[in-house]
Image (cartoon, rainbow, N blue to C red):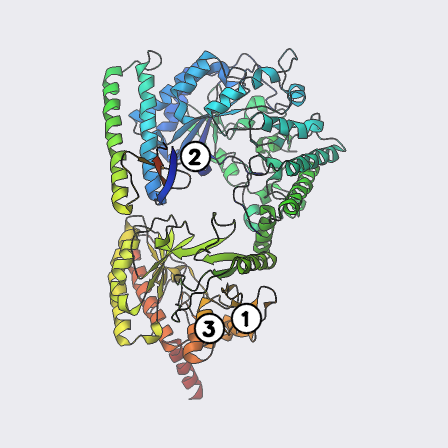
Amino acid sequence: MNNDPTILMGKLSPAWNDGTAKSITFCVTEDCNLACKYCYMTGKNDKIKMSFETARKAVDYILTNPAEFPEPSVVFDFIGGEPFMEIELIDRICDYIKRQMYLLEHPWFNSYRFSFSTNGLLYHTDKVQEYILKNKNHLSIGMSVDGNKMKHDLQRIRPNGGGSYDDVVKNVPLWLEQFPGSSTKATFSHDDLPYLKDSIISLWELGIKIVAANVVFEDVWEEGDDSVFEEQLKGLADYIIENKLWKDYSVRFFDPNIGHPLTEEDKQRNYCGAGRMLAIDCKGNFFPCIRFYDFSLNNRKGPVIGDIHKGIDSDRIRPFLGLTLKAQSRAECVDCEVASGCGWCQGCNYDLAETATIYQRATYLCKIHKATVRSCEYFWNSFERATGLISERTIIGRTRENRNSEIPAKYMQFITSDNITPHCSYRNTKGTGNLMSQATYEKGMEFCLKNGFIPVLLGRPPFMKDELPDNCLSIEDAQSGANTSIAVHDNTAAASSGTSAISILIVNRENLERLYDFAASLYFQYRRVNLVLEDIEHWSDKETESYSRQLDKLLPFIAGTYKKGDPFELSVLSDIWELNTMRNCEAGQSSFALAPNGRIYLCPAFYFEDEDNYAGTPEQGIHMKNPQLMELCNAPICSACDVYSCRRCKQLNIKLTGEINTPSRIQCLVSHIERNKSMELQKLLMENSQAKFDNLLKAIDYIDPLDKILRKGSAANA
Amino acid sequence: MHSEKVGMVTQEEKNRVMSLHERILGLEELLVSYGRQANIQEEKDELYERLVTDIGATKLKLQNWWDDMYCKYHWKSLEGCNWHIDFQTNEIFLDKNTP
């Protein structure tokens, strides 16, 4: 099996700056040179236009109130009607925005875009082209083409009833040349369902490879529409499979995220960004989004949330910011088995709700969504049969299943070679050089998929030429040059060329005195460093004192990073602050390791210590003896301890005490040194800032929890 | 021309160079607006001068960024060839002219 990350099907163009920009929309005219039948702007007219003075006041308000617009980037969106009918006004507004951002030294000057949704009819005109040339590095232009000529002309008509397809399509090559990789939004409604398959194919043939197709949210659907829709989508699925189009073409209906049960996280999110955007109408009134403009609503007046004179009324925004999926949906939608990807429009909800509320979700497209889910599933099942690959939809489904069942994620570490750089308390000291074969790797990946494990590659197998498979993590030597999830610095702080934000720092006895230097150097590369101390079984007082001194030296350094607002997390000091229960070593519970010999071990340390002490194989599964001893509740010394961040290395336990559930004294001493230094750091941070902690540490009078247990026992026996 | 991947930078380093790059593009496009007779008339000469100076200073900062990164990472380099950065992946490429 293999997962190819280059498959485009179902994906949309990534949003600029990961969608973090503030969206500010100017409606420059309520006029349009088309009269599309499905358009929600039912009140369009040729009378109302924005004046430059109104736009100027809006820009002044926005740019001089940065506290109300804290986003690091901005997209100024221009819509109508048809925005290019007012290109001269837009040009003037854009020049004013640029000038003011520059003169005010506004941070948005270094991060802005102008965005347009156009019907494309005026795209080729001199004035529009001149504007594009002038602002070419800051533009995003979407052109609406609905599909083939039949479908497009059925809906996107001129005021005289004639179709617009021919005039729009002749501008598509110029548009794609100027904005390569652009996508279009094709909208489907009751009338045009029979043309869906041909429409999507037609758009692809025009060179528009990504189609963000959608259906209307309004109450337009009739009995049997879902069957027609499903038949069309399945026909499209067959066409894609027959012509092997999944790598280079995409349509949103086959998004692999569609049709899964909701996670708790999903239920607390809102699908729509209304309220986080700002939409300004021609008169200078502010709205939560364009769908709330007066001329976009049929049954209600648009809810104004401010204007260019008085600014934003923050109370009017609050209901939008509080919206969650759960709060606005009926129970059957929240608990629906195929709910993910089922959307709504906040403005449409408001327009159609029984009372004037945004908290009542319209569900007219329920049957259409379910038809989308069946078709999406059909496509990805066909894809799996045709390619032998596991589809992203299958992987997403299993990952979400695990999340929903509240079972912690399970990880399978792939020891790709005996010579991997260690990432925890182990090291190959036997000089063996076994490599994981491709057959073992593939069996391991199949085991992961069937049993809900997330694969974690330790090192990179030599046969893997491409990027990592999706849903797979990697831990590799920082010097390998590979793009890894977590980079390992093995007794060095030499700079890495990777991009991971997290690193593991391995420090052995010989380098203990360099701990401060290592950690301080890594701060400039990583936000977080997980410290692993090697060979603590050989530590004496000399090493514990040295470790203590090094941590002492790090305390003011780390406190300084918090003070300057760029905090450095060192696992052994900061993890405990967020823990209220013991963080168990997950070996043998939610984490296992597959070795080059094809056997599964509790963790890599067990493999390198004794190859015969394995827990299973991918073929036969995992069969452990006394699995209850893995659990914290059956580890009496650890259960009595409050150093919740302790590593509790199970392999070290068995090596030094003979019992997997019983820590050695040195393990407890090291952890308590860390606890005490962590407490000192907490105090330092609280003196210097308003820092708050989930777990506020208190002084204790022991450094080995066994002493505490024994004291209690003595008292009981007295 | 073909490109060879020669390294990567951190997210913070990418953000810094992207900001400088965006600033230069913004300055150059604003300069076009000032240069035309159309929409911006007031303070024309004074701000035109300021923009030109700012473009020069920002380009210098951009060059310093590349110099600093080269010192830090020691990427492969070739006489007469340039590096470029992919803002999506943070990867650095060496652009080679093919005969």
Q: How far apart are marks 2 and 3 (CA)?
A: 47 Å
Q: Which of marks 2 and 3 is nearer the N terminus?
A: 2
The location of residue A491, given as percent across then percent down, is 31, 62
Picture quarter containing residue A616? bottom right
Of all chains, the one bearing label 2 is A
- Mark 2 against mark 3, which lies toward the viewer? 2
The label shown at residue A615 is 1
The location of residue A149, given as percent across then percent down, is 65, 20
Q: Eyeballing the image, is A273 above or below A440?
A: above
Secondary structure under the numbered disc 2 in the rendered image: loop
- Which residue type carries mark 1? Ala
Q: Which of marks 3 and 1 is nearer the N terminus?
A: 1
Q: Eyeballing the image, is A363 above or below A385?
A: above
Secondary structure under the numbered disc 3 in the rendered image: helix
Q: Earlier in the sequence, mark 2 or mark 1?
A: 2
Closest to the observer, A256 or A639: A256
Closest to the observer, B95 or A370: B95
The location of residue A391, given as percent across then percent down, is 60, 47
Q: How far apart are marks 3 and 1 (CA)?
A: 25 Å
Of all residues, the one furthest to the bottom in this rendering is A718
Horizontal side of residue A418 vs A686, given as left or right: right
Secondary structure under the numbered disc 1 in the rendered image: loop
Closest to the observer, A30 or A251: A251
The location of residue B52, given as percent across then percent down, is 25, 23
